[in-house]
Image (tube, rainbow, N blue to C red):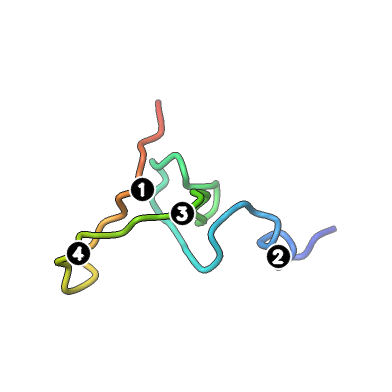
Amino acid sequence: MKNNNEKRNDCSCIKGVTCEVKSCVYHDSESHCTADRISVGPAYATNSSDTACATFQPKEL
């Protein structure tokens, strides 16, 4: 039986990146991003509320 650390290491997610956007195709069933890479912007952002994940792709219903 795997412990939580082993399970986390087995995911195809970006280490250190969490995602709570359950409507994104890259969101796994927990809180991980499974995209190969992410793009966050815009370049003029001055705080976290100005940023957005440009990698977001909506899940098809």
Q: Quadrant of the C terminus?
A: top left
Which of the two residues, 25 or 31, is positioned nearer the viewer here?
A: 25
Name the residue furthest right. 1
Is 40 above or below relative to 61? below
Q: Are marks 2 and 3 in contact (CB under 8 Å)?
A: no
- Looking at the image, is 40 positioned above or below residue 36? below
Disc nearest the viewer among 2 and 4: 4
**Mark 4 residue type:** Ala
Which of the two discs, 4 and 1, labels the residue nearer the N terminus? 4
- Between the C-alphas of marks 2 and 4, the distance is 36 Å
**Dot 1 surroundings within 10 Å: few (below 14), some, or many (20 or more)?**
some
Q: Position of residue 15 (x, y in %)?
A: 56, 65
Query: What residue is at 47 percent from the left and 45 percent from the top?
Result: 26
Mark 3 highlights which residue? Answer: 37
Query: Which mark, by number, is residue 3?
Result: none
Element at label 4: loop
Within-10-Å neighbours for mark 3: few <14, some 14–19, many 20+: few
Q: Residue type at mark 2: give it.
A: Asn
Instruction: Tell me the tag on residue 43.
Output: 4
In-image side of 9 versus 56 (left or right): right
Residue depicted at 31% across the width and 59% down the height: 40
What residue is pinned by disc 2? 4
Counting residues from the start of the chain, the first of labels 1 and 3 encountered is 3
Query: Three-letter amino acid code at disc 1?
Result: Thr
Which sits earlier in the primary sequence, circle 2 or circle 1?
2
Mark 1 and mark 3 in contact? Answer it, CB < 8 Å. Answer: yes
Horizontal side of residue 40 vs 29, given as left or right:
left
